[in-house]
Amino acid sequence: AEDGIRDTSVTGVQTCALPILCVLPREHRLVRRKVIRPADLRGERFLSFPLDGRMRHLVDAVFEQDRIDRRTQIDVYSSAEACALAARGVGVSIVEPFTARDYAKSGIAIVPFEPKIRYLFRAMRPRYRKPSLLADAFLDAVKSHMRTRRSEEHTSELQSPMYLVCRLLLE
């Protein structure tokens, strides 16, 4: 599909694109770096996403371009799983920023990764049904929130999607 979604009954509407981040155990030797580059992770125990996932292809391409070998420790299926394992000292990973921020107080360090790889966030909608006014208003609110806070220097201010859903429902 042109929007990268395999299920033909839904379509994706991009809400934002944010840089992915490196997560490490809090006591890791690289936590004081201002930025992590592929060469910094040479030989590290790496928590990777499945081979058939878009995130895996994006991250692997950067390491392959620089001919950097990692020791793939475990394949993880979510950024939450990667962060939880990094907090336990199992390895390091590259994840999307919302989950990294949610795990910041759980024993991980978060360091920007370069070269920048943008992770696309999408809202899923039924392809063959007209969206409701409420759904349109909600999506507009999400996009507005992301637009006002999407620069790297404001990444820590971004609210997780679930927090934003709850806040908008209670307003």
Image (spheres, rainbow, N blue to C red):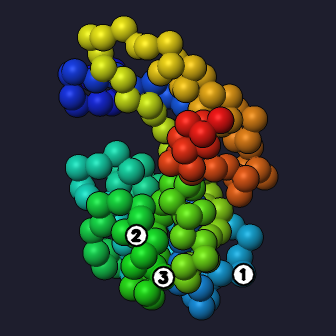
Above/below status of 107 relative to 75? below
Q: Residue at x 76, y 50 (%)?
A: 154
Q: Amino acid at mark 1?
A: Arg
Q: Amino acid at mark 3?
A: Ala
Looking at the image, do the residues carrying marks 2 and 1 touch, with CB atoms under 8 Å apart? no
Q: Residue at x 55, y 44 (%)?
A: 166
Lateral position of residue 49 relative to residue 105, left or right: left
Residue at the right extreme, as displayed: 153
Label 1 belongs to which residue?
Answer: 32
Element at label 1: loop
| Label 2 Cα neighbours within 10 Å, binned few <14 / some 14-19 / many ≥20 | many
Element at label 3: helix
Lateral position of residue 77 relative to residue 96, left or right: left
Looking at the image, do the residues carrying marks 3 and 1 touch, with CB atoms under 8 Å apart? no
Q: Residue at x 29, y 15 (%)?
A: 127
Disc 3 versus disc 1: distance between alpha carbons? 16 Å
Work out which quarter of the rendered image holds the N terminus and state it.
top left
Work out which quarter of the rendered image holds the C terminus and state it.
top right
Q: Residue at x 26, y 11 (%)?
A: 128
Above/below status of 97 relative to 146? below
| Label 3 Cα neighbours within 10 Å, binned few <14 / some 14-19 / many ≥20 | many
Q: Position of residue 126 (x, y in %)?
A: 30, 20
Task: From the image, state whether disc 2 or disc 1 is nearer to you.
Answer: 2
